[in-house]
Image (cartoon, helix red, strand yellow):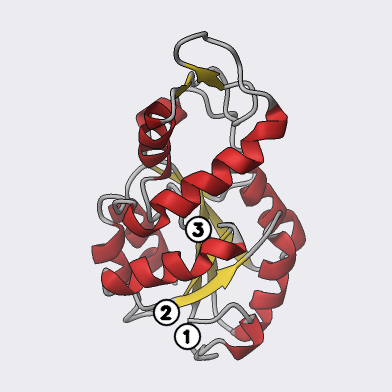
């Protein structure tokens, strides 16, 4: 696994899957809720964003947006190494790896990327890994050059789907989200070629369009 995409082990003659991690491979929100509760905070699910949704349990006071970066950092520090897997992710990736290259493209804070890579390895998910920051369209535009075959991108965030779709030419975008609480508040996903709720569907979409 590598952070430098130029050193990735990619077979140009195979298609490519670029896959997000939080809420796609790992149960981010369930783990985040546990962390918040342990620290006298709660997530209200009023909107599809962090700012404005984190409150103190005892006073119901909304946490200032200036404090959110440190909350997220401390969460990843304590939970990156123990987040449970999304149902079906491991088994379906194992099947898909027989047909294509796989890159995990994660916006985890760089300080905790090693913990994420270790957890992937502990789950026998030894795939190429890139630690990204911000929109993923630019890096996916570069990753397009790694293969002459079809490319698929899976993410749970509408803004990342849009970033990739508007910055690349030949990437099939798949929006995936299975968390029922998030599904109730997610804005419309406008730039996805496919929308899925489980990993079996992702596998079928890719194998049917490979």
The residue that label 2 is drawn on is 100
Q: Name the disc covering residue 14, or none.
A: 1
Observer-nearest residue: 107 or 98?
107
- Where disc 2 sits, the SS reads loop
Q: Is residue 95 visible?
A: no
Q: Are marks 2 and 3 in contact (CB under 8 Å)?
A: no
Q: Looking at the image, which residue sits at the far top?
A: 59
Given this view, does label 2 or label 3 mark the residue nearer the observer? 3
Q: Are marks 1 and 2 in contact (CB under 8 Å)?
A: yes
Is the residue 155 above or below the residue 118 in the image? Answer: above
Percent x, y of residue 94: 28, 72
Question: Which label number is shown at residue 20?
Answer: 3
Q: Secondary structure at mark 1?
A: loop
Name the mark on residue 75: none
Question: Of marks 1 and 2, which one's residue comes earlier in the chain?
Answer: 1
- Residue at coordinates 43% horizontally, 29% vertically from top-left? 39
Badge 3 local density, few (<14 within 10 Å), some, or many (20+)?
many
Task: Report the residue at 28% width, 54% height from top.
Answer: 200
What's the CA distance linking mark 2 and mark 3?
A: 16 Å
Residue 169 location (% of width, % of height) = 71, 66
Say which of 40 and 20 sits in front.
Answer: 40
Q: Considering the numbered disc 3 on the image, is that residue within a helix, a strand or a loop?
A: loop
- Of the residues tagged 3 and 1, which is closer to the observer? 3
Name the residue at 42% across, 44% down: 28
């Amino acid at each position: 696994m590598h952070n430098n995409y130029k050193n990735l082990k990619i077979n140009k003659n195979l298609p490519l899957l670029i896959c997000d991690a939080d809420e796609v491979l790992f149960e981010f929100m369930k783990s985040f809720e546990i962390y918040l509760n342990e620290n006298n905070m709660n997530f209200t699910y009023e909107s599809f964003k962090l700012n404005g949704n984190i409150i103190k349990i005892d006073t119901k006071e909304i946490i200032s947006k200036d404090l959110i970066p440190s909350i997220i950092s401390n969460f990843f520090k304590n939970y990156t190494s123990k987040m449970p897997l999304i149902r079906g992710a491991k088994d379906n990736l194992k099947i898909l790896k027989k047909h294509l290259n796989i890159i995990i493209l994660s916006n985890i804070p760089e300080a905790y990327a090693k913990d994420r890579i270790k957890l992937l390895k502990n789950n026998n998910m030894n795939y190429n890994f890139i630690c990204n920051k911000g929109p993923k369209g630019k890096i996916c535009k570069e990753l397009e050059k790694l293969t002459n075959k079809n490319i698929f991108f899976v993410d749970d965030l509408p803004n990342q789907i849009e970033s990739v779709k508007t910055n690349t030419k030949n990437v099939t975008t798949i929006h995936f989200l299975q968390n029922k609480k998030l599904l109730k508040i997610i804005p419309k996903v406008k730039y996805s070629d496919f929308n899925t709720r489980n990993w079996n569907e992702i596998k079928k979409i890719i194998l049917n369009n490979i």
